[in-house]
Amino acid sequence: MTHADAHAHGHHEHDTEGPRPYFPEPEWEEFKKDDIKAGTAIILEMAGIFSIGLMLYAVIAFIVGKS
């Protein structure tokens, strides 16, 4: 591909609705569902880590405040 070809194809990295790769539409829908599941898992994991940290902080604050 030459430099002129790259400009002729209009490749834009921020273009999310541009031409799609060669996946059929049902597969794209499956990708979207998987993305939502992965996002949910990440949010739940972050909430769990935050909760554990908050509990540890409260226990330590209780112990230090007691002495």
Image (cartoon, helix red, strand yellow):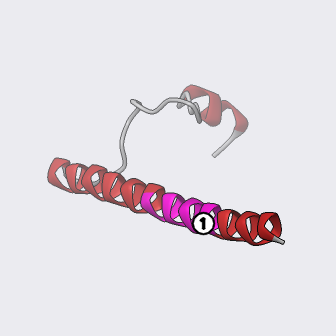
14 drawn magenta: no
Measuring from the top left, give residue 6's x and y in whole percent.
63, 35
* Position of residue 18 in the picture relative to residue 10 (left or right): left
Q: Which residues are magenta?
A: 44-55
Q: What secondary structure prevails in the magenta region?
A: helix
Measuring from the top left, give residue 2's x and y in whole percent.
68, 41
* Position of residue 66 in the picture relative to residue 38 (left or right): right
In the image, residue 35 sits, relative to residue 57, either above or below, namely above
Query: Residue placed farthest to the left in the image?
Result: 26
Measuring from the top left, give residue 31's x and y in whole percent.
30, 55
How many marks can you see? Answer: 1
* Position of residue 8 in the picture relative to residue 62 (left or right): left
Say which quarter of the image contains residue 53: bottom right
Residue drawn 30% across the image and 59% down it? 34
Residue drawn 15% across the image and 52% down it? 26
* Position of residue 12 in the picture relative to residue 61 (left or right): left
Residue drawn 56% across the image and 33% down it? 11
50 drawn magenta: yes
Hey, what amino acid is under mark 1?
A: Met
Question: What secondary structure is marked by label 1?
Answer: helix
Would you name the residue on which mark 1 appears?
55
Query: Residue placed farthest to the front in the image?
Result: 67
Measuring from the top left, give residue 67's x and y in whole percent.
84, 72
Circle 1 crowding by C-alpha within 10 Å: few under 14, some 14–19, many from 20? few
